[in-house]
Image (spheres, rainbow, N blue to C red):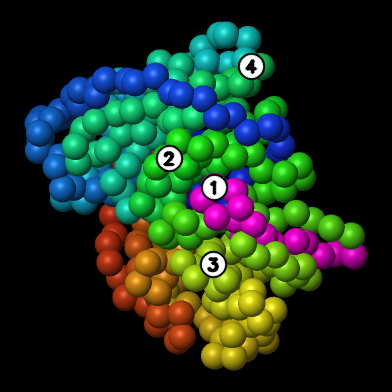
Amino acid sequence: MTPSRGLALFALTAATVAPVITAAPAVAAAPVTASAETTAGAVSGDSVRYAWVRGCAKRNLTVPCGAVTLTLLDGRTVTLADARVHPRRADGKVDRNDAAPLAVSGDGRYVSYLRGDRLVIRDVARGTVRPLPGGADVLPRRVGQNDVHVTLSSGGSLAVIDYGGKAPALVVNLGNGRTTSVAAKTSVLTMSPDGRHLLTRRDTEGNTADFTVLDANGGKVHSESVPLALFEDAQVTLADDATTLAILDRIIPDRPRLRVYDMAAGAFATKVPFGVALRFGVPKGELPQRLSWDTDGTLTLWTGRGDKRDGSFVSFVKRVVDPRTAATRRLDSFTVKKSSWTWHLPGE
């Protein structure tokens, strides 16, 4: 079986619209349906290792058929009985060959999903659920649930909602409820780990792009024009200082490189100079997929190992990376359920 997706998309395409700022009605906390290994109250203090939906054979296809399930760091599983599994298309029909949007914060403490037809966020430890604020819980007209992709910041304080180009994307401040649109032809690349800043990209003439740092309410902090050749095929992540970028260069897939770029100086950091970019020391067969800054100034690197038959990812390793030397240390490793149709790691 080939899962519907692997790791997170590296950029969230966005459009523009006037910001939507409305009061959001309250939603009562939804119960957690426990598996045989856990009870609803036992999830306190735990984080999500990965979220997944089981797949079942349907004629010559494999389709999502089980409830949304959270596998926790200690190996227990929690079933979210209130989470929608199959999305409703723009025409109102339910697509039983696809899975509804689902996102996990980078720290694994929060999960966003559709509860009925509304986008909500769940505090995993407390088991409480509330709608995304500012009217962001309700999808725009003519947007299907299968068009939606949500990304949460590391600590769950910001959400970026992309509508697949069918409606303007929104940045939602989950603390104060403010929603802000992203300018036309602009994409959100990444959010800082503390959730206070986000990095956007807008391609311009002359093979350049404008990289702009915004605060959590959409205010402009810093902007710089950069050559696309330096960033075109790389994943970029923003540090808490709102100026330092770490770049996962995967031009050669089996020889990924780390670069650190200082937006304030407009140059690569001297300790990781361009042309002498450091290489990650990961075992053969593991493919680096995603890089993100941590609040302590280190980096987290996710790698995946694929099935030799169909190339789909079957296991993952989480490592901490020293940005000065690219030295790595393993934090966690696990194999995803063979029966899963789709899965989401923390940060996607």
Say which residue label 2 marks: 176
Residue 185, given in percent of the width and then of the height, sits at 77, 45
Q: Amino acid at mark 2?
A: Asn
Report the amino acid beneath label 1: Asn
Which residue was labeled with disc 1?
A: 217
As displayed, is residue 166 above or below residue 252?
above
Q: Who comes first in sequence, dot 4 or dot 2?
A: 4
Task: Tell me which label, 1 or 2, sits earlier in the chain.
Answer: 2
Horizontal side of 87 relative to 164 (left or right) equals left
Q: Which residue is drawn at the image coordinates 42% and 70% (left, top)? A: 299
Which badge, 4 or 1, is on the more N-terminal residue?
A: 4
For the question of whether residue 7 can be seen, the reply is yes
Magenta residue span: 206-220
Frontmost of labels 4 and 2 is: 2
Q: CA distance from mark 4 to mark 1?
A: 24 Å
Counting residues from the start of the chain, the first of labels 1 and 3 encountered is: 1
Say whether residue 42 is left or right of residue 246.
left
For label 2, count other residues whose C-alpha is less than 10 Å away and answer few (under 14), some (14-19) or many (20+). Answer: few
Find the distance from the CA under tag 1 to the CA under tag 3. Answer: 14 Å
Badge 3 is on which residue?
A: 242
Residue located beneath label 4 in the image: 141
Q: Magenta region's main secondary structure? A: strand
Q: Quadrant of residue 235?
A: bottom right
Q: CA distance from mark 1 to mark 2?
A: 9 Å
